[in-house]
Amino acid sequence: MGALLTLLLFVALSVLINQVAAKALMLTGLSEDVARFQARSVSTGTGFTTSESEHITSHPARRRIVMTQMLLHSAGLVTILGTGILSFVEPSGTTVVLRRMLLLVTGVAALFALFRSRRFGRALDRLIEHVLRRYTTLTVRDYEALLHLSEGFRVVRFEVEEGTWLAGRTLRELDLPEEGVTVLSILRPDETAAVVPRGSYRLHVGDSLVLYGKEDRVAELRGRPRGRPGEGARAEAQHEHAQTERQQDAEQQAYEKEKAQSARQPPASDAD
């Protein structure tokens, strides 16, 4: 039983190391999708040869993060394998082995559910970010603070897929700013990029979009279908953004009125 608990502990530590590495990469300016993919690639040893890895190997701080992650995972893998073997090969009956296998599967499922929890994920992200900022000397570009990403906004990159609402349309036709979404850049499959693209730019399947907007809205936009459901989602998004703009206008008017009243008030004179 002790060996089994040790195995679950090291699995949890392995996932935690992956989370820390992803957050550290995000603090250096990588988008959330790219940072998490590259951290997972390092931990599993697959996929790290993609072109996106060049953004890590050419950046000193990111390279240090990945090297540390590789070292920790290589040491932990040996421990996990050794502990896992000991959990099942020590003298025991078939019933005991089956019970341990059931406990292992249950424990891994519980850990998976915990790390998939949004509330736990947000709390863990805040803790990791606090520790990294306090105890490391990473050269970071704090895009999260600059773009107010902590308020539910995200910079997200994803590919345009076949059959989706985005494919085959120009940016002018999409009119994404009316939904509160800004297109920062477009990357073609041949790696040519359009930074701040114009309205006549047409999206094709395989193009990579870099968008800035509310996290839930960008996630919905990524898989928005063609046809009536897609147009309905578009109308809903535009209505929601219009309401947000009206609220912001009201807040701005109240702020300007308060500033004007403060300017008209005479300064208080000092008592003799």
Image (cartoon, rainbow, N blue to C red):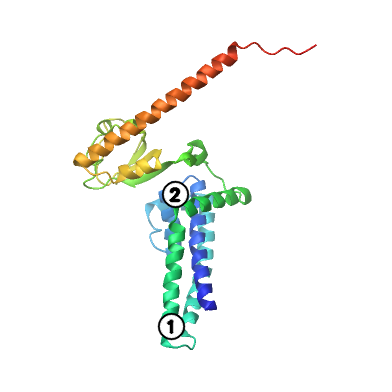
Q: Which disc, if any, is residue 55?
A: 2
Vertical placement of residue 260 versus 89, above or below? above
Vertical placement of residue 260 versus 115, above or below? above
Which residue type does callout 1 highlight? Val
Q: Residues within 10 Å of mark 2 (few under 14, many from 20)?
A: few
Examine the image and state in which quarter residue 187 appears. Answer: top left
* Disc 1, SS: helix
Count of marks placed on residues: 2
- The residue closer to the viewer here, 187 or 37, is 37
Q: Earlier in the sequence, mark 1 or mark 2?
A: 2
| Discs 1/2, front | 1
Measuring from the top left, give residue 24's x and y in whole percent.
52, 51
Q: Which disc, if any, is residue 97?
A: 1
User: Distance from label 1 to label 2 (Cα)?
Assistant: 46 Å
- The residue closer to the viewer here, 235 or 180, is 235
Task: Name the residue furthest right.
Answer: 272
Q: Is residue 197 shown to the viewer in this render?
A: no
Measuring from the top left, give residue 32's x and y in whole percent.
43, 48
Which residue type does callout 2 highlight? His
* Disc 2, SS: helix
Q: Residue at 48% across / 62% down in the picture? A: 15
Q: Residue at 25% across / 34% down in the picture? A: 170
- 159 horizontally vs 132: left or right: left
Measuring from the top left, give residue 249's x and y in whole percent.
43, 23
